[in-house]
Image (tube, grey):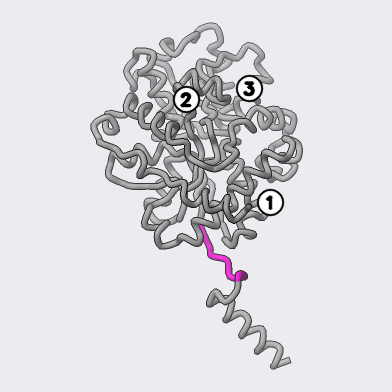
């Protein structure tokens, strides 16, 4: 027995030294609202065991919005953000550099929705002046999308009162109870409301290519994995593993049905209304990237939008090519083949 336990100890020591592919590196991944379908690939990769297969032990930490998950990475309590790429642009203006290394949303999926209680009263973005508008959390992508819409409609970016309402059931409740007059929402919350209120007013929708092009004039990347460049430099193996896991997950998504994808998701994220979740998922699948690559034109579109909504970004001379890299995705593709 002693011999056996000594053998086990030696094997464990070898694993600790990284003697085999067995020793998975631990990575803390901060996610900006796991219930949102925009972040589904991040959660699904865990459910499919893709992180483990790639050699990383991922701890997913859920936050209310992208701005909070970002704070966790900047503060050092998380390693990588699973959130919207546009935060990297906003931070570059403050001389804080972050870099996205795999993109999983081709479109942002943001929808500006009028509260059912305000149907017929709020008919355009201009009507939001002086109104209460919900966002996931102040400073999040939902907030910037609202500001962009207000400025585009000829209003001041602070002409509506911004209220943080989260992304899931809390946002739906705030809308139904009339605590807010409108909100920037994402699926499945949008579809849940659309199924309940057939005359629901959508002032702006970026869930499909056609709608995204109408709003932004082209592709507009949403969810991505990003972190500090120095973390990437010190953890190239982990960065590559996270990329491999995401690229494999995206391929899995595009080769399976919405029902099969839903069956893999944690029941608490699917919720009680499975029909609405499934309908929302069917709407969302085209939004997910097929490659994981950043489209340089899409990155430029994000910068152009932020120049409108943020004076800091407009003033800063941002080199957009420093906010992302496609190197890891290109390598992931080679190993897959």
Q: Inspect the magenta stretch and tell me whether residue 281 lies in it.
A: no
Quote the CA–CA distance across marks 1 and 2. 32 Å
Instruction: Name the spot of residue 267 as percent of width and height, x first.
Output: 71, 43
**Residue named by callout 1:** 48
The circle drawn on residue 183 is: none
Q: Which residues are magenta?
A: 21-27
Does the residue at mark 1 contact the one at mark 3 (Cβ under 8 Å)?
A: no
Of mark 1 and mark 3, the one earlier in the sequence is 1
**Residue named by callout 3:** 193
Q: Secondary structure at mark 1?
A: loop
> Seen from this angle, which residue lies furthest top?
120
Foreground tag (1 vs 2): 2
Quote the CA–CA distance across marks 1 and 3. 30 Å
Instruction: Name the spot of residue 271 as percent of width and height, x first.
Output: 69, 37
Of mark 2 and mark 3, the one earlier in the sequence is 3
Identify the image quadrant of the N terminus: bottom right
Q: Quadrant of residue 319?
A: top left
**305 vs 52: above or below:** above
**Residue 293 located left or right of residue 321:** right
Q: Residue at x 54, y 36 (%)?
A: 105
- Residue 296 appears in view: yes
**Residue 216 located left or right of residue 6:** left
């Amino acid at each position: 027995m002693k011999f056996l336990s000594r053998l086990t100890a030696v094997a464990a020591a070898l694993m600790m030294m990284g003697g085999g592919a067995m020793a998975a590196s631990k990575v803390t991944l901060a996610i900006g609202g796991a219930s949102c379908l925009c972040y589904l690939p991040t959660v699904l990769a865990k459910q499919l065991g893709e992180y483990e297969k790639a050699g990383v032990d991922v701890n997913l930490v859920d936050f209310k919005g992208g701005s909070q998950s970002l704070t966790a990475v900047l503060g050092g309590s998380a390693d990588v953000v699973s959130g919207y790429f546009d935060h990297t642009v906003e931070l570059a203006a403050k001389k804080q550099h972050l870099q996205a290394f795999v993109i999983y949303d081709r479109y942002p999926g943001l929808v500006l929705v009028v509260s059912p209680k305000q149907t017929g009263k709020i008919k355009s973005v201009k009507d939001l002046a002086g109104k209460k508008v919900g966002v996931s959390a102040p400073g999040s992508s939902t907030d910037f999308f609202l500001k962009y819409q207000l400025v585009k409609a000829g209003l001041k970016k602070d002409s509506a009162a911004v209220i943080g309402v989260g992304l899931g059931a809390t946002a739906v409740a705030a809308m139904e109870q009339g605590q807010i007059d409108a909100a920037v929402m994402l699926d499945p919350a949008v579809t849940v409301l659309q199924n309940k209120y057939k005359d629901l007013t959508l002032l702006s929708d970026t869930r499909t290519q056609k709608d995204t092009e109408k709003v932004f004039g082209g592709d507009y990347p949403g969810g991505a994995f990003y972190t500090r460049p120095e973390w990437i430099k010190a953890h190239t193996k982990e960065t590559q593993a996270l990329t491999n896991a995401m690229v494999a997950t995206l391929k899995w998504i595009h080769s399976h049905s919405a029902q099969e994808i839903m069956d893999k998701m944690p029941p608490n994220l699917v919720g009680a209304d499975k029909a609405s979740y499934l309908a929302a998922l069917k709407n969302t699948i085209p939004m997910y990237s097929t490659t994981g690559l950043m489209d340089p034109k899409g990155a430029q579109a994000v910068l152009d939008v932020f120049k409108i909504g943020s004076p800091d970004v407009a003033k800063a001379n941002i080199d957009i090519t420093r906010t992302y890299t496609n190197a890891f995705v290109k390598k992931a593709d080679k190993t897959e083949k």
